[in-house]
Image (cartoon, grey):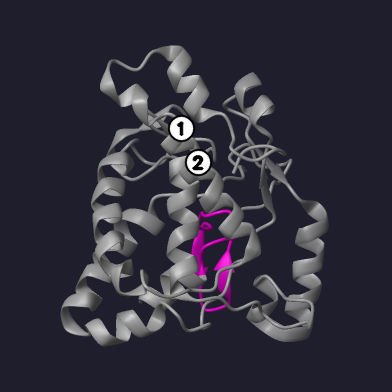
């Protein structure tokens, strides 16, 4: 179940609509359907996955530790793109662009390779595989990149987080529930990653850059924790650490 969960998550740290016998599935815009929307679900990779990780550590701790450094895990190639930071500010209820070109590419690959066509491929034409350490870092960094001190995790994917809305009808504002679980998740990961502290663990270049950038932002603004954080302080912390838009 842990493998199934992390293999369904995307390279920008979210999870698609559902998993079926045909692999991951996502919503596609239909101009004839007024209930047709696109959007990422972001809670499963923290709240539900954390519970599965805790169970696996309790029953098979060696298996979990081995997963951290083995390239066994993939990324779902969901054709959604989070809009740049400036556009998120302009309209926080219109944050996701549907990438038709990627959708067409994925469907072409599915016809040729089955459900593996829904995964991110490498330059050799095979699903790109990474270790569990990277797969756990990516959604964590996505959440931290959308952290608003004194509020919660900013919802910018047009879908609600767990227990933040009734019947999945609201997906904007901030999530406090996910923030609370994120703290528990961080505590778990600090202990899980501890055996890796004295060595090197390979991750993708893009993930390493984002990790360094997020760490630099949090370290720079740590003095703000000494008092009440102002709106100006929230903006300073919340601006994207990398150029080119939001995570």
**Can you name the residue that lies furthest to the left here?**
58
Identify which residue is drawn at 49% across, 76% down.
131
Q: Position of residue 123 (x, y in %)?
A: 79, 77
- Whether 34 is drawn above or below 113: the answer is above
Q: Quadrant of the N terminus?
A: bottom left
- Residue tagged 1: 220
- Residue tagged 2: 216
Q: Are marks 2 and 1 in contact (CB under 8 Å)?
A: yes
Q: Is residue 114 visible?
A: yes
Magenta: main secondary structure equals loop
User: Which range of residues does the magenta coloring cover?
Assistant: 8-26
- Whether 127 is drawn above or below 209: the answer is below
Residue 226 is left or right of residue 22, and the answer is: left
Q: Secondary structure at mark 1?
A: helix
Does residue 71 show up magenta in the picture?
Answer: no
The quadrant where residue 163 appears: top left
Residue 234 is left or right of residue 184, and the answer is: right
């Amino acid at each position: 179940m842990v493998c199934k969960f992390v293999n369904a998550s995307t390279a920008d740290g979210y999870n698609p609509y559902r998993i079926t016998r045909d692999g991951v599935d996502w919503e596609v815009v239909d101009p004839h359907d007024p209930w047709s929307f696109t959007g990422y679900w972001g809670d499963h990779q923290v709240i539900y996955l954390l519970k599965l990780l805790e169970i696996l550590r309790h029953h098979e701790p060696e298996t979990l530790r081995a997963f951290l450094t083995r390239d066994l895990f993939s990324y779902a190639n969901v054709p959604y793109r989070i809009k740049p930071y400036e556009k998120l500010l302009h309209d926080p209820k219109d944050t996701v662009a549907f990438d038709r070109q990627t959708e067409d590419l994925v469907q072409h690959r599915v016809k040729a390779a089955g459900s593996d066509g829904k995964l991110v491929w490498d330059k050799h034409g095979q699903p790109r595989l990474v270790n569990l350490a990277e797969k756990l870092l990516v959604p964590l960094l996505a959440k931290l990149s959308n952290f608003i001190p004194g509020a919660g995790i900013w919802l910018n994917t047009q879908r609600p987080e767990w227990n933040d809305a009734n019947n999945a009808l609201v997906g904007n504002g901030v999530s406090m529930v996910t923030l609370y679980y994120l703290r528990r998740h961080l505590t778990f990961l600090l202990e899980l990653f501890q055996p890796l502290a004295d060595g090197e663990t390979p991750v993708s270049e893009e993930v390493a850059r984002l990790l360094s950038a997020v760490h630099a932002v949090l370290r720079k603004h740590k003095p703000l924790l000494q008092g009440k954080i102002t709106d100006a302080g929230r903006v300073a912390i919340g601006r994207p650490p990398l150029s080119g838009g939001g995570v």
